[in-house]
Image (tube, grey):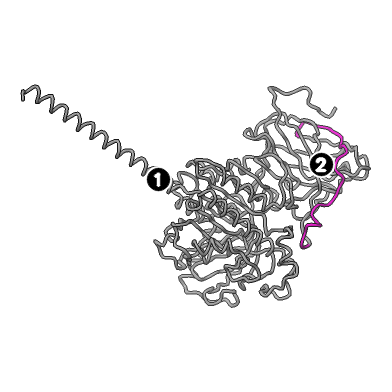
Amino acid sequence: MKRGEQDNQVLVVSRRKKVALQFVVAMVVTLMVQAAESLAAESSPNVIVILTDDQGWGDLSFHGNDNLATPHIDKLAKTGVSFDRFYVCPVCSPTRAEFLTGRYHGRCGVYSTSAGGERLNLGERTIAEHFKDNGYRTGCYGKWHNGTQFPYHPMARGFDEYYGFCSGHWGHYYSPLIDKNGTISRGNGFLPDDLTDQVVSEILESNEKPFFIYLAFNTPHSPMQVPDRWWKKFEDKKLGLVGRKTGKESRQHTRAALAMCENVDWNVGRIVEALEKSNQRDNTLIAYFSDNGPNGDRWNGGMKGRKGSTDEGGVRSPLFLNWPNHFEVGRQVGSNAAAIDLFPTLASLSGVPVKSGHPFDGEDLSAKILGDADQQPDERVIISQWKNKISAKSGVYRMDQRGDVYDLSIDPEQRKSVKPPGEVQRRMTAALKKYESEVSSSYGQDDRPFLIGHPDHAMTQMPIRDASLIGGLKRSNKFPNSSYATQWSSSEDQIQWDVEVAEGGLFEVTIYYTVRPEDVGSAVRLTFGEEVLSAVVAAGRVPDEVGRVEDRYPRVESYEQSWGQQSLGSIYLTQEAGRLILTAPQIAGEEVMDLRLMTLTRQIEDQKNESVNRGQ
């Protein structure tokens, strides 16, 4: 063979080798990409966090309560991971703040359950924001309870979708007024079922992105309303287990609460069924817990305290984590854990990096969940606070608000205080001192106005819950949430909101109200600084009472009414802090109206409009 022919043959062989090598490299790259995509999918599970409202640790058959049956929730525990000692706050909004931020609620501006004290500071970054930043579609359904007006609203805190109510409790559970993505809508049927319908729709929706869903049920919080399907089982049921305080328990209230818990269980089953139907169950991590102790003196494992208490019964909650093929079936974690741990733990398990934000008070528990770390009660100190009541838990010991210490390993009912080992006493005392210095020293100090006119959202809700009532005006109930202003009979009476206008502009004002036919025609005036809007109360809905028929047990909060709506016209608000004041200069009858809510909706305009009614 000639030299040239040999060179050509070598060149051909070389080219063939090069092509083959390129093919191999391409195959390797393809396989690596596929593996990376598979790993990414594996490390980006769907996440569903289910939070119940006023369900105690003992309100589950999994914890030994044979007064009811909760098979779907029990299955989450039996086929997943359960926590023996998981702690939340004594009441609603603080627990929600701690879950959302991984930080003690006192750091986050939350110190109350109403009238602005429930708002989560705007400097806090939420778990939803972090999941959204990492490619998740996010949805919140149910009771928010960490701020109503933008940018406190859930859609300004990392959630793409919102369907529920932002208040601490809602006055009626059957097709009530609903906040749907920042607008006022009407629900469809029994609220927990409606919320579940929304979640099921989200699960079944075809979307390449993983989802992060926060489902905050409104039950078994009062009003004690539940459909006949569940009530009939409990209406005359003989209950074997009783509450710790003999003679304090209302059996009818307990029956209603347990019926509501069984309804929640049914809805949890519907969610799991939807995941299975859509072939997403194996890649969905479910977390289930409650926001505080039970809202009644019913059976709770004999523990001391209920909702509102910093004793064990007021702050111990179930926590079940379930992710098929990822967690050891039936694993129980014995270490102390708390709501502040959920953010870092769920982010870690899901492969979601936490890039910024304030330091967590909580810990990443993923190693204990996966069986890679000691799960026994440790030396960590967890603080529980509600107003001036503070307790601490470390290992098996709880120090109560009076400084008495109990060994829960031998005295789970906190019957007799003990003198703990010196290092335990010193550890809890030091932790409490540090907490009081960093957190509780400023607890309840609040000068935040209510924000209106946020540029990212058209409508601002101003409920009577957030108002000050001046003169003879009365709130419909001592509990501000879901209340309304009534007995408005004097021109000296005022409804005031301390506000700050985030961005100035022209706003249409709408009221949600009722008025008796003989009282129609009162003149009302809304002022903000020098701006004035005047209108006349038109015929609308007649005052009524909604909810009494559906209640299974007498409530302590306000009943709702069938609220009518009326536009009062438009007012120009300048970008500044001030006071919105609503008065009635002329009263047509005995009373002006009952007022539940006022909304301000931004109108499109380029400059101050001379057609604005200035009360001339």
Question: Would residue 345 appear left or right of 215 to someone viewing this image?
Answer: left
Which range of residues does the magenta coloring cover? 528-553
Q: Which residue is mark 1?
A: 38
Q: Earlier in the sequence, mark 2 or mark 1?
A: 1
Is label 1 in a helix, a strand or a loop? Answer: helix
Q: Position of residue 355 (x, y in %)?
A: 45, 44
Disc 2 to disc 1, C-alpha distance: 54 Å
Image-quadrant location for residue 258: bottom right
- Please tell me how crowded label 1 is: few (under 14), some (14-19), or many (20+) other residues with Cα within 10 Å: few
Question: Would residue 576 appear left or right of 204 to someone viewing this image?
Answer: right
- Position of 580 relative to 226 (above/below): above
Q: Position of residue 370 (x, y in %)?
A: 42, 59
Q: Position of residue 269 (x, y in %)?
A: 59, 57
Q: Which residue is mark 2?
A: 564
Identify the residue shown where x is 60% and y is 68%: 61
- Please tell me how crowded label 2 is: few (under 14), some (14-19), or many (20+) other residues with Cα within 10 Å: some
163 vs 368, nearest the viewer: 163
- Main SS of the magenta part reads loop
Q: Amino acid at mark 2?
A: Gly
